[in-house]
Image (cartoon, helix red, strand yellow):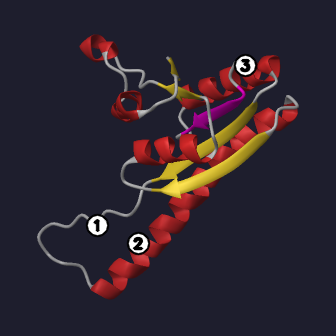
Amino acid sequence: MFKNILVPTDGSPLSDKVIKYAVDFAKDADAKLVALSVAEPYLPLHDGMMPDPLYMEEWQHLHDEQMFKLAHDYVQRVYDAAHAAGVTCKKTTAINFNPYEEILAAAEKFDCDVIFMASHGRKGLNKLFVGSETQKVLANTKVPVLVLR
């Protein structure tokens, strides 16, 4: 069945639920996990005045560094949960404005045969739709996707 499971995480409580489910499934199926978190790059916003380029570069560097640290912390959660359950887990992080692209690339790179993802826990009419990144993965992947709410 499934032997290489990709687990993208954004550190949200819903992603944490997916981690638990993925670890339990991997343990029962004797599968391996690949944990992925995609950091969001710096996007300078300004009110019509251009910031000093020297400060802009410094802010971008600090922002990207912090986002990578958070991404690493998120995949470490998956790794720690997997390790505690005796499940093999690889960790990977990336930086991209479009996380779904990194999810698709990681699924291919690590030869994953399923992706376990969280939907966005929206309310009202929006509960009929899954999160935009999840939707983009579903529309573009060649492997099965298990969406958890």
Q: Secondary structure at mark 3?
A: helix
Mark 1 vs mark 3: in front: 3
Residue 137 % position (x, y): 41, 33
Q: Secondary structure at mark 1?
A: loop
Residue at x 49% of width, y 72% of height: 62
Asked whether the residues under the numbered discs 2 and 1 touch, taking CB atoms below 8 Å apart as contact, a structural biologist would say yes
Q: Amino acid at mark 3?
A: Phe
Residue 48 as seen in the image, left or right of residue 73: left
In this view, the residue in front, 149 or 25, is 25
Q: Rounded to the nearest whole Å, what is the CA distance between mark 2 and mark 1?
A: 8 Å
Q: Residue furthest bottom?
A: 54
Q: Which residue is mark 3?
A: 25
Residue 48 % position (x, y): 11, 70
Residue 3 as seen in the image, left or right of residue 113: right
Residue at x 64% of width, y 44% of height: 110
Residue at x 41% of width, y 25% of height: 120
Q: Which mark is residue 44?
A: 1
Q: Amino acid at mark 1?
A: Pro
Q: Main secondary structure of the magenta part?
A: strand
Q: Which mark is residue 60?
A: 2
Residue 18 as seen in the image, left or right of residue 48: right
Disc 1 or 3, which lies upstream in sequence? Answer: 3
**Badge 3, how many Cα within 10 Å: few under 14, some, many 20+?**
some
Disc 2 or 1, which lies upstream in sequence? Answer: 1
- The reply to whether the magenta stretch includes residue 5 is yes
Disc 2 or 3, which lies upstream in sequence? Answer: 3
Q: Amino acid at mark 2?
A: Gln
Q: Residue furthest left?
A: 48
Q: Which residues are magenta?
A: 3-9
Residue 57 against residue 132 in the figure, above or below: below
